[in-house]
Amino acid sequence: MQWKTVFDLALDGWKHLWPLPATLLFLPLLIWGLRHDLKKRAYGAARSVFAIFVLSVIVLGVGWGAIANVSSYFSLLQTEHRAAYRTIEGSISRFDAEPKSESFTVAGVRFEYSDYDVSPCFHNISKLGGPLGEGLYIRVAYGWDSPFQRNCIIRLQVGVPPKSLHTLS
């Protein structure tokens, strides 16, 4: 059997970290607005305190998300480079495609992910063009993604049967 690689963390994982820098781009605008509001004092002290609180929550949330995602990405990348991951292959069973999430089992190991994931792991659902479905023969290299507490697909390969010599086009 030949294999077609449809996902590799080392090549594709960093692409899923874009929400964090995009969010960080808005922080200077928020800070400018807060500074302008504090200088003007047009809306009173209560609104200024509320603005500082909202900005603090945003900064802490983005900071926590950045730390969790970046550390997860580099930890899993290191796992891939050290070959410290597990590899299984087999046919997909118990494939469950919800509107925004999927789960399936291969050789007794369960995987689940969502379209809303910002983790560097594979999470391309079939309803949005993902390659997986019931009965498909795949090879999965995976590790444990600590921040998200689940199996993380580091490399995904789909089995491509060799073309028959007797097939005429």
Image: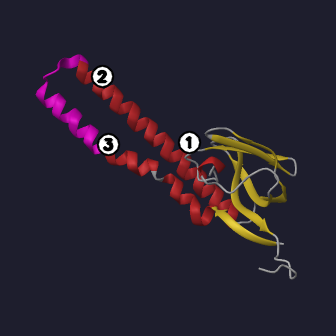
* Disc marking residue 27: 3
- Looking at marks 2 and 3 on the same chain, the residue that comes earlier in the sequence is marked by 3
Mainly helix, strand or loop, the magenta region? helix
The region drawn magenta spans 28-46
Image quarter of residue 84: bottom right
Amino acid found under the numbered disc labelled 2: Phe
Q: Is residue 18 above or below residue 81?
A: above
Lateral position of residue 128 relative to residue 26, left or right: right
Amino acid found under the numbered disc labelled 1: Tyr
* Disc marking residue 97: none
Amino acid found under the numbered disc labelled 3: Leu
**Mark toward the viewer: 3 or 1:** 1
Q: Quadrant of the N terminus?
A: bottom right
Residue at mark 1 to residue at mark 2: CA–CA distance: 29 Å
- Looking at marks 3 and 1 on the same chain, the residue that comes earlier in the sequence is marked by 3
Would you name the residue on which mark 1 appears?
Answer: 116
Lateral position of residue 44 relative to residue 145, left or right: left
Q: Is residue 82 above or below residue 39?
A: below
**Residue 44 rendering spot, x and y as whole percentages:** 17, 18
Judge the density around disc 2: few (<14), some (14-19), many (≥20) Cα neighbours within 10 Å: few
Residue at point 24%, 24% (across, down): 48
Residue at point 51%, 46% (across, down): 67
**Residue 9 rendering spot, x and y as whole percentages:** 63, 61
Residue at point 27%, 44% (across, down): 28
Residue at mark 3 to residue at mark 1: CA–CA distance: 22 Å
Image quarter of residue 32: top left
Q: Is residue 19 above or below residue 140?
A: above
Callout 1: helix, strand or loop? loop
**Residue 71 rendering spot, x and y as whole percentages:** 57, 51
Would you name the residue on which mark 2 appears?
Answer: 50
Q: Is residue 148 above or below residue 4?
A: above
